[in-house]
Each structure stands twice: as structure tokens, then as C-alpha cells.
Amino acid sequence: MDYAIIKVGGKQHRVRDGETLVVDRVKLDEGASFEPVVLLGEEAVKVTVLGHGRGPKIRIGKYRRRTGYKRHTGFRAATSQIEITLGDGTKRGAAKTAAALKKTDAPKAEKPKTEAPKVEAAAPETAAAPAGLPEGYADLKVGEVGAGSKEWSHEQLEAALAYEQANAARKGAITALESALAKESEA
């Protein structure tokens, strides 16, 4: 079985290996581990506390009409972020935990190294661009696509539409290109 049902903080959760959850506050420090009550699945389930936080603010208002009575209060639930490891911990969850701890312990000077692969990953998309695509199209925002579609030729509009449907799938850009093609076919 690739999942388990555990009980943490009086609530039941269906979990998989390497999954992170936000649950009600656990009374352990960050980095501590414990074994929850397992209701279904593997008996060897380990939970690691990644951090503590607070949930979104909920505004509560009381009001009585025609009396001027108004009271407001707010509430934020105390939460903990936990990570689940099923089995002996040698699966992908252990690798994710180690990677997460390395990222938090890394000095700030190493951040540009993590940003470099993102730029390299964007380069292959431009290589697969169809012929006739307007110059610099991949870097255009939706508003710029709408403005530029009025000036582009029919071939450029079709190439841009094909690119959007294959790669980016931005609704606003697709709508602007389709309307520009419709206006061109009416004229």
C-alpha cells in the first residue's frame, strides 16, 4: 500500500511518503520526530515537524440592529507543518527532508546558483517555437500580445496562436490572437 491513514491532533489524515501537511499545532520543537497513531497502512510511519506557524485570520463580528451594538474579534489557528515518511525512511521522503534542511541552512550567497537553472530551462521552449513567430514573442506579457496582434501579419498571428496553445496556454493571449484572426477574416 502506498499510503497510510494516521491520526494527528485528533484528526485523521490520508498521507503518502514524502508528503507535507499543515495540521493543528504539535507540541514538539522544529526538527523533532514522532510516530503517530496508524489507523490503516504501514505500521512504520514517521512524522517530522518542519515548522510552526499560524493560519489565516478569521474575522468574527457581532451585530444587533437598531441598538448601535457592534463587536469584532479575530482568530488565527496555531498550526504546524509536518513531513511524512512511510516505511524505513529510505524512500524519496528522506531525500526531500535532507534537501529541505540543506536549503534552510545554506548561506544567502548561494541563491543565484538555484536561479541559474530556471533561465536555462526556459531556453529550450524558445527553440521549439514555430516558424513565423514575432520576434521576442516568448517574453511578451498578455497585454503586449493583445497590442501587438493588431500589427502582426496573418502568418505571425497563426504562429503565435500555435505557440500559445502548445506552450504557455495563457487564456488572455489566446483570446486576443483568436479575435485578431477573426477580425482579419471578416475584413
Image: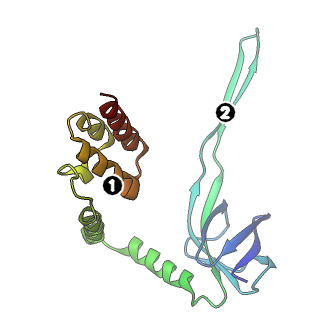
Instruction: Place residue 20 in its image quadrant.
Output: bottom right
Residue at 79% of width from left, 77% of height from top? 37
* The label number, if any, that marks residue 73 in the structure image: 2
Q: Earlier in the sequence, mark 1 or mark 2?
A: 2
Position above or below: 82 against 34? above
Question: Tag 1, which secondary structure?
Answer: helix
Q: Say whether residue 84 is left or right of residue 164.
A: right
Indicate the amino acid at tag 2. Thr
Instruction: Place residue 44 in its image quadrant.
Output: bottom right
Q: Say whether residue 136 is left or right of residue 29.
A: left
Nearer mark to the viewer, of 1 and 2? 1
Residue at 50% of width from left, 78% of height from top? 96
The coloring applied to the image is: rainbow
Residue 104 location in percent, x, y? Answer: 41, 71
Q: Residue furthest right?
A: 39
Residue 144 location in percent, x, y? Answer: 26, 39
* Residue that mark 1 sits on: 163
Indicate the amino acid at tag 1. Tyr
